[in-house]
């Protein structure tokens, strides 16, 4: 990147890649000296890295190639945008897969791309930082909670401003819950009851939040629910970001979608076709978590882990250059 052609307070242009259980996301951004981000590109792919991991404990061979092809596209995009540094991180599926090192070595050999596996605590911290980054420095008072419903795990992080007070990573996500229990669309009443009970069991140690807490939700479940609530003809990040979802709206969406077969779910313009089969599981996690936390609303954010990765990568590189 030619820094001379960028804004004078830009440190660098970098890319951060979030390789999740269900999605592969890439942010390309110019990072300023105050830590703020100027978004250049935001890419979204459904990789399904975690397909079968919960049942068999390994990443499938066809998945190796599917995710490699996605990462190859993302590397090409980053190269065309003169990215100086590219950081790639993996989450729940890579933490759980027995053949994770084989996958990491395969990607590195094929693409010269190193993947760092984040612990649950690291994922929670970076997700929180990414979610609140667009509010800084104006969130230094009050309490914030960030909810990240992933494919394999769910993170709940409490903090004030950029400072985290507590975090927990729950070993249940939309892909995992679907593969374990909600295997057929539409699910029968027994499967729904079992799914709800499973989520409640995983949430039993979660405490209610104070009435002054602002709950922020990131990732595909909440952004899709926002698009459905707004009834927009297609997914638009500008409209979805900062939309406030009520528990009543989420329950209405759940009741509308629960009796529908997969082909009808895929017919909704707001629902990505590759997300349709796991959306109901994500909504169950969302509404049960909000109930347990005693939160009546959630503010939708299109930010999250990839933003946290970008901010911390830039800080590390900048400090090394001092």
Image (cartoon, rainbow, N blue to C red):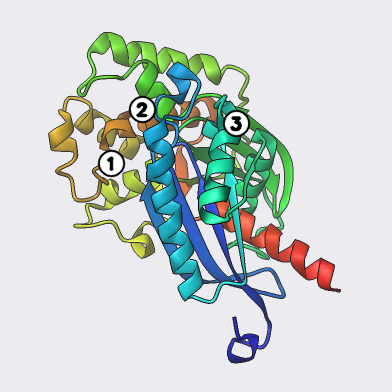
Residue located at (67% from left, 44% from top)? 125
Q: Residue furthest right?
A: 322
Q: Quadrant of the C terminus?
A: bottom right
46 on left or right of 17: left
Left or right of 125, for residue 177 = left
On residue 95, the disc is 3
Q: Are marks 1 and 3 in contact (CB under 8 Å)?
A: no
Count neighbours of disc 1 (C-alpha within 10 A) and say few if under 14, some if 14 to 19, many if 20 or more.
some
Q: Residue at x 68, y 83 (%)?
A: 9
Residue positioned 28% across, 56% down in the render: 235
Query: Relative to 177, does residue 193 appear above or below in the rendering?
Result: above
Q: Which residue is mark 2?
A: 281
**CB under 8 Å between discs 3 and 2:** no
Residue 151, which numbered label?
A: none
- Quarter the N terminus occupies: bottom right
Residue labelled with disc 1: 274
């Amino acid at each position: 990147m030619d820094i001379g052609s960028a804004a004078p307070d830009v440190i660098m242009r970098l890319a951060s890649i979030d390789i999740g259980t269900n999605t592969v996301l890439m942010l390309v951004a110019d990072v300023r000296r105050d830590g703020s981000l100027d978004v250049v590109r935001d890419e979204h792919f459904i990789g399904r890295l975690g397909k079968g991991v919960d049942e068999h404990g390994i990443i499938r061979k066809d998945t190796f190639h599917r995710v490699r092809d996605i990462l190859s596209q993302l590397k090409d995009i980053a190269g065309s945008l003169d990215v100086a540094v590219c950081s790639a991180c993996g989450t729940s599926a890579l933490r759980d897969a027995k053949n994770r090192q084989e996958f990491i070595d395969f990607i590195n050999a094929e693409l010269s791309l190193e993947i760092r596996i984040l612990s649950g605590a690291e994922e929670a911290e970076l997700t929180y930082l990414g979610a609140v980054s667009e509010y800084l420095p104006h969130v230094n008072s009050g309490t914030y909670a960030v909810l990240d419903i992933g494919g394999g795990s769910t993170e709940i992080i409490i903090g004030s401003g950029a400072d985290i007070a507590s975090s927990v990573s729950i070993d249940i996500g939309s892909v995992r819950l679907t593969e374990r229990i909600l295997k057929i669309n539409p699910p029968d009443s027994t499967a729904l009851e079992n799914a709800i009970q499973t989520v409640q069991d995983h949430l039993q140690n979660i405490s209610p939040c104070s009435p002054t807490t602002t709950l922020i939700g990131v990732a595909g479940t909440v952004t899709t629910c926002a698009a459905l609530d707004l009834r927009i003809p297609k997914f638009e990040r500008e409209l979805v970001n900062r939309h406030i979802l009520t528990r009543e709206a989420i329950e209405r969406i759940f009741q509308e979608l629960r009796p529908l077969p997969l082909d009808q779910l895929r017919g909704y313009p707001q629902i990505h076709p590759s997300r349709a089969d796991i959306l109901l599981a994500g909504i169950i996690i969302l509404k049960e978590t909000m109930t347990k936390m005693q939160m009546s609303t959630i503010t939708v954010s299109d930010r999250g882990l990839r933003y946290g990765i970008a901010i911390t990568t830039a800080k590390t590189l900048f400090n090394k250059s001092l």
